[in-house]
Amino acid sequence: MLVYTLKRLLLALLVAMTVSAITFSLTYLAGDPAIAMAGETASDADIEYIEKLYGFDRPIVVQYFEWALNAFQGDFGQSFYFRIPVADLLLERLPVSMTLGVSAISFAILLSIPLGVLAAMRPNSLLDRLALGISVVGQAMPSFWFALVLIVMFAVWYPVFPTTGSETWLHFVLPTIVLGYYATPAIMRLTRTGMLEVLGSDYIRTARAKGLPQHVILFKHALRNAVIPVVSLAAVQFGFMLGGSIVIESIFALHGAGYLAWESIGRNDLPVVQAVVLVFSLFYIVLTFLSDLLNAWLDPRIRVG
Amino acid sequence: MKKFLAASALASLALVSAIPAAHAGKADDTLNIVWERELENVDSYFNTAREGIIVTRLTWDGLLYRDPKTMDYVPLIAKSFKWVDDTTLEFQLREGLTFHNGEELDADDVVFTYNWVANPDSGVKTQRNVNWIKEAKKLDKYTVQVMLKEPFPAALEFVSGSVPIYPQDYYSKVGPDGMGQKPVGSGPYKITEVEPGRKIVWEKFDGYMKDGPKGTPTIGKIVQRTIPERNTQIAELLSGRADWMWRVPADQADRLKSSGKVQIVNEETFRIGYITMDAAGITGDTPLKNPLVRKAISYAIDRKAIVEALVRGKSQVVNSACFPSQFGCETDVTKYPYDPAKAKALLAEAGYPDGFSIDFYAYRNRDYAEAMLNFLSQVGIKANFGYLKYAALRDKIRSKEVPMAFMTWGSYSINDVSAITSHFFTHGKDDLALDPKVKELLQKGDTTVDSAVRKQAYSEALKLIAEQAYWLPLWSYNTNYAFSNDVDFTPTSDEIPRFFTASWK
Amino acid sequence: MTTTIANRGLPAAEDIVGPTPGQQLRRRIFGHRGLMIGGGILVIIFLMALSAPFLAPHDPYFQELLARVKPPVWTTGDWKHVLGTDQLGRDYLSRIMYGAQISLLIGFAAAFISGVIGTTLGVAAGYFGGRVDMVVTFLITVRLSMPVVLVALAVVALIGGSLTVVISVLGLLLWDRYAVVMRSATMQIRQMDYVAAAKAVGCSTPRILLTEIMPNIMNNLIVVATLEMAHAILLEAALSFLGMGVQPPLPSWGLMVSEGKDYILFEAWMITIPGVALFLLVLAINLVGDGIRDVTAPENRN
């Protein structure tokens, strides 16, 4: 187990380094940062002055290593736009994205696991069809459009929820539904498949033969086994969700990290864009690392292979 | 059906306003304003957005103030002022003024502020606002002299708008970062809370001067929130959770106005739109080098139709490369009314009877740009459109990759053509015409003090620009302000909302 | 010899074993409701896109500034503009029809580019294993760690949006699923007897890959291709919605939602129509993809 963990850790670190290099090179090409920093009303002199002040005239490799070393220590530099450390901005904005991500994944799990289980219990029943319908619709609906429809419905026609800001839990309801629904189909399908497999397996048949009640079989024996792959999928989906939050956050004006990244792209505020891409990637890397370990711990065969 | 839907939409929005909201507006003497921009820093020397100017006028005072009605410069922190010579201004200060933190405001603060911002190492973002200052000197506790680097006729404009006075003791202790987090000024409102980019809270400053040109503030508290989505701003306004918003698009303004639930006031702004064309061939050998082609483009676009259908409000078609009310803005220049037949004829004469294809960029008002694309295609010009963010487009222009772009310029609300025409036609990085004659005339206008000479020089330059069709000036912009029926608010044409003059009805 | 047997009046082969594989397949296809519905919608959208130049009632680029934001016929509109007009007075129905061309083009082209990249990587990893597999797996992991929307936005913001840029960016980003699926499918096939046989006979590696491996992973490839096509269409719409995708005046559906967004409080139909079009197209592609998977590999059906 230790060897496996170390191997996976090394891989995760390597991936993180590659991602950071790509991130840096990608966003660094996004126009002259000095112009963005100087703002709309700046003169040529202002821009040249800023260029020198921040060292944008140095070779890109030098700038990368300086950036990566600092980022490794949690220092992402200063936001060109806000003139405060990017780390501070992230610390302020990430909790919003995390709240949204956690509530959305919880919503997705609470919706999709029961549906998946019920669907698996009675394949081809009305309920199974309904579950399938929900997942098919969820996969096809553009999330930005769904968000707008919810805004029209719940801000204009039936004003129940606030549509903008992140002050109270009510503000998170609509974005949670949109983002969570996006992850529902995959989790539900996996739950259903897993349950079908487990329910068809020998030990469940044995349990049934022993006359155990249905709910015990379902929840104690079957679900527990079916849920293992779901956990790792949920971890992966959580990572995807952070990435997808950029669209949702900008529509609902949730001041989270995704929205910050979107605004920063438009402002050429490179340090922020780089930091958000990197942090989101790192989240994904850490989550998959943890879920790999969890799987290996649950299923010893993986460790050997 | 449509009317019914709109009516029911408004009716249900009205329902929300019946629910007691956390921000109650007039009832608890709090003006809730919303805008789109995330302001990078409330310290006015370190932001560049127009919203920053609003915050500055509310929180800080300068030595002078430009009366938005008469456009005259009147003393504010100063009691009186005079030109000692072409490069020296002398100010007598009011006595007994204090900053929000109780610190006394006297010559030391003024001298400190001017000398600090004049120093390039301080890093003031918009250097243009301060780089005309040589130094400031204290003559006695209430007398200050400001020295200019060279004669600069527009100096009073900057003294009144762009150089707010900072408290010496406080600022030298906390610096720009501290000022951004806990700002201290001497203006009519003091800031009590800042969430960077999201929220600013002001309270009326009780110690504010009684007989100043900015008047005495009446509303107790002002809360600003950033809401990036305009539709949500409208929803907030209709539901009573916001009392004031601006820049409402024309179509929505019409619908809001007819609802009667809010007041809509339209006001012209200093901002004009224009198409800049690569006459000098900076981006390569494009058809735009030919003046006939530039004229054809000018004739091809029905600016009047776009203003009437899309821009609307108090906007008008402009023909010279400046805002008509600006000092020196010559309006008697070559005009290009909509005439597609003439445009085609000119294109044929220039050797492009079947038109040509060209890259065309824009950064705002995508619908106006699309309408122009369509007019161009009708005379055979195929424009490959690119819609970029401002910073990206400006960078592209400066790296010589943009032959033609739809741009706008707000002249920093400065009532003088030096803030627009001279900015673009004196061979800077944004100059795609590079006409030496135009440059010479504009520089003459910029550095002469005699206003008749200035006027003459600018007039000649602007006539030349129009005659050569370096730019196609499009239209002036307007802003729709929407605010609660409880609020008494008057917008001004310099596009700087002054909340210290607002009151409850 | 065989003819004589047949002539003796023995029943033909198909009568003994039942329907041929081809007949079975046909029966499964027509018996699959999802596939039929999805295929039907897809054919309609496809025909709409192809016939837009003949059937569209108006020029999708023709603007009539005096007839802006006309509502569709079922509210207060008229039959001149069945689905109403947009903010520049352009016919909404015609723009929807031409918009189908753009969505389909982006879907096909992006799925093709990413398919070439992903399949090459996946097959190479699955077939050669060892170090090649390690490198490819590493690349997949790196790619999966990067947030797609954010990276696509940043890149398009840098180069400037256009049809080709969007297609290339999506093509270069969406290859991960191909690689994952192709890799494991190839691994399974590689161990089959006929591959070993081909190797033993001395067939060259390219020949084995082309004649033995590829035909056998084709089903998987098609299923992934439909998924990625749907994915690319949705992403293009999202990018265009955020203003970083296809550029005006092209009638991209995502762009239409974005332009109609200003009107959602008063003219909700402006976002509803292109939104529903997008939904139907993606739904149809997904149904077809699921259907193909069920039909070609019935044993994998859930």
Image (spheres, rainbow, N blue to C red):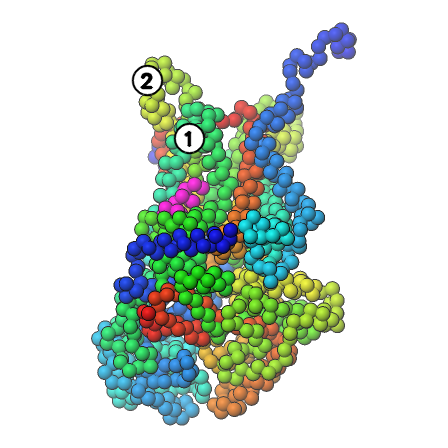
Q: Which residue does the numbered mark 1 point to in the structure image?
A: A116
Q: Residue at x 57, y 72 (%)?
A: B474
Q: Quadrant of residue B321?
A: bottom right
Whether residue C161 is visible here, answered yes or no, is yes
Q: Position of residue C208 (x, y in %)?
A: 63, 30
Mark found first going from the N terminus, 2 or 1:
1
| Residue A180 falls inside the magenta stretch | yes
* Residue at the disc numbered 2: A212
Label 1, secondary structure: give it: helix
Please report the bounds of the magenta region as a residue range: A172-182
Q: Residue furthest bottom?
A: B85
Picture disc at residue A198: none
Are dots 2 and 1 on a single chain? yes
Residue C30 versus residue C147: which sits nearer the camera?
Answer: C30
Q: Is residue A291 above or below residue A101?
A: above
Judged left or right of residue C70, residue C23 is right
Residue A101, given in percent of the width and then of the height, sits at 38, 45
* Relative to C264, residue B400 above or below: below
- Residue C114: % across, % down: 57, 43
**Front-lying residue, B417 or B492:** B492
User: Farthest residue toward the left?
Assistant: B102
Residue drawn at point x = 45 percent, y = 86 percent? B153
What's the CA distance linking mark 2 and mark 1?
22 Å
How would you classify the magenta stretch by its main secondary structure? helix
User: Residue B487 vs residue C119: left or right?
Assistant: left
Q: Amino acid at mark 2?
A: Leu
Classify mark 2: helix, strand or loop.
loop
Q: Is residue B472 magenta?
A: no
